[in-house]
Image: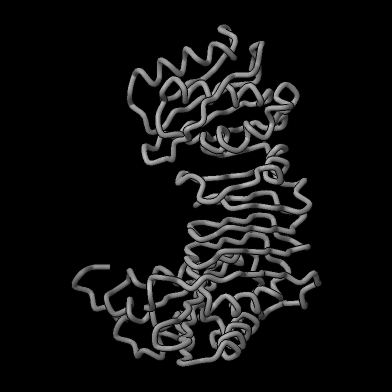
Amino acid sequence: MDEHEPDNLSSLPLELLLYIISFLPFESARLIPFVSTRCRSVWSQALVFAHIHNGSIEDVSHALSSFIHNFNEHDPSKNTRKMELHFDKSTFVSTIIAPHNVMHMNFFSNGSKNEKSYCWRIEIKDQIPRRVERSGFLVKTLCLDSVDSLTHEVVSSMVLDCSLLENLKICGCKGLTSLTIDSPTKLVHLSILDCPKMRYLDIRSPKLKTLHYQGFLPSIKIHEHFNLTNAIFNVRQGPRYALDIGPLLLIIKNSQSLALCRWMFEELIKPSISSSWTSFQFYKLHELRWIDNSMKQENINSLISFLKLCPSIERIFITMDLNTYSSKEDIIDLFKHARTLKNLKLLKLEGSKREDDKNQLIVALQEIVNIDQPLLILF
């Protein structure tokens, strides 16, 4: 559009602009703020559905349920994608319906930084959802941010009927100490990030394939874990509590892709399998993401010891982070004979530019990789 040409769209009345936007697909409507300065404020108003001030837990739960079940993308009066609900003067939740059956819920609070501790149980009913043709929103991916002791009951009530939920992401729940998830139906992917007080995690989800955990490592128990193929433990801060690695070791043993920090191997895994060192293997593991704070010789020795437990490994990604917790355990290689990684095709080192690190790693790999074996090494 020529800069001197009149902006006829922005000159339209607000009610008419909102009506026009309501007919646009979300991916097109989200570009409205770039049309003009006025359209930025119009877009914000088009998103917001309702405000409830000083609402009770029941009021907020009912409003959320109505917002989801009454959504209709093809009806201009029912296709609003954002709702803000205020519990009181200091707490409110922003709920956004996004394309591809994704819903985001962000909780905001101006209260004390010392979050009140709470235990949380999320249960998803094993039921066939009501038939939804042209109305209603089926949540398949749910992202929850900063749920606290006041608001977790609202989420539990809402999630109860999300029987098609496949992907659940929980992050920034500062007061959460114990989490139980019971999903006998569809849950496939679970991410729990930055919940610093978490001590216990109990999961019953027979179809779970991916578990991504970031923060201090809690005690984890997964019932019926045989479908879990991708386990990510970004626990660079180290251990906060004494842990029993036994249940977790059984869970990750059959993983095809695994991410863990060196200290987990040295302080948790290795002591647990010392008596069966020669027979224990991660025999299905194809991809390893190893997190460490340096490439000192003793750290490399730990990596090599772990790799000897992974006969099918194909890809190794090593991340260097100086802030990663360092174990004080001494690792002794209990293998009397070297094991060759015949399937290894790729090794990538990230976060280190020191030539000595690269050279030491290459020398160490010669113990477990044939010299004539094709291997791509990236630094």
The answer to whether 24 appears left or right of 356 in the picture is right
Instruction: Report the number of discs.
Output: 0
Residue 175, x across and y down, in percent: 50, 68
Residue at the far left: name it.
Answer: 4
Q: Where 190 falls versus 286 (above or below)?
A: below
Q: Quadrant of residue 90?
A: bottom left
Q: Quadrant of residue 246?
A: top right
The answer to whether 318 appears left or right of 189 in the picture is left
The answer to whether 346 appears left or right of 51 in the picture is right
Residue 83, x across and y down, in percent: 49, 82
The answer to whether 275 appears left or right of 105 in the picture is right
Residue located 33% across and 87% down the image? 12
Front-lying residue, 113 or 32: 113
Q: Where 196 falls versus 294 (above or below)?
A: below
Q: Where 300 falls versus 18 (above or below)?
A: above
The quadrant of the picture occupied by the N terminus is bottom left
The quadrant of the picture occupied by the C terminus is top left
Residue 178, x across and y down, in percent: 61, 63
Residue located 48% across and 21% down the image? 377
- Residue 342 visible in the displayed image: yes
Residue 146, x across and y down, in percent: 48, 69
Front-lying residue, 311 or 236: 236
Q: Quadrant of residue 63?
A: bottom right
